[in-house]
Image (cartoon, grey):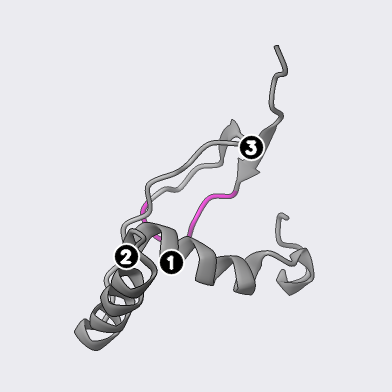
Amino acid sequence: MDKTEDICIPATHFDRRRVRWVPEDSHIRLEVRLPAPMVRELTILANSRGASIARVVTDELEHLVGDNTHHGAGEEN
């Protein structure tokens, strides 16, 4: 059986104040508050794709953070 490596999720400026180590293949719950018009558009997009809103948001965020070069100096990858 293959064991996945753990990755470090750095402490945040708000809420969780400590580092977390989780398996790389984990799915972590993230609660965010979004403007109603944005939620509307995400819902329409999800419905048109026949996917969940979580799947659509994950796909869209992958384009933003999928490339590690977006991290600032001194930030954990």
Residue drawn at 20 percent across, 83 percent down = 36
Helix, strand or loop for disc 3:
loop
* Badge 2 density bin: few <14, some 14–19, many ≥20, Cα 10 Å: few
Helix, strand or loop under label 1: helix
Alpha carbon distance from label 2 to label 1: 11 Å
At 50% across and 42% down in the image, what residue appears?
A: 18
Say left or right for 63 vs 59. Answer: right
- What residue do we see at 57% from left, 33% from top? 22
Q: Which residue type carries mark 3?
A: Glu
Give the residue pinned by disc 3.
24
What residue does disc 2 label? 32
Query: In the image, residue 4 lies at what x, y percent?
Result: 69, 27
Instruction: Tell me the amino acid under the disc marked 2.
Output: Val
Other-residue count near label 1 (Cα within 10 Å), few / some / many at <14 / 14–19 / ≥20: some
Label 2 sits on a secondary structure element that is loop
Q: Quadrant of residue 31?
A: bottom left
In this picture, which residue range is highlighted in magenta? 10-15
Q: Nearer the viewer, mark 2 or mark 3?
A: 3
Q: CA distance from mark 3 to mark 1?
A: 19 Å
Residue 38 percent across, percent down from the top left: 30, 83
Residue at 76% across, 64% down: 68
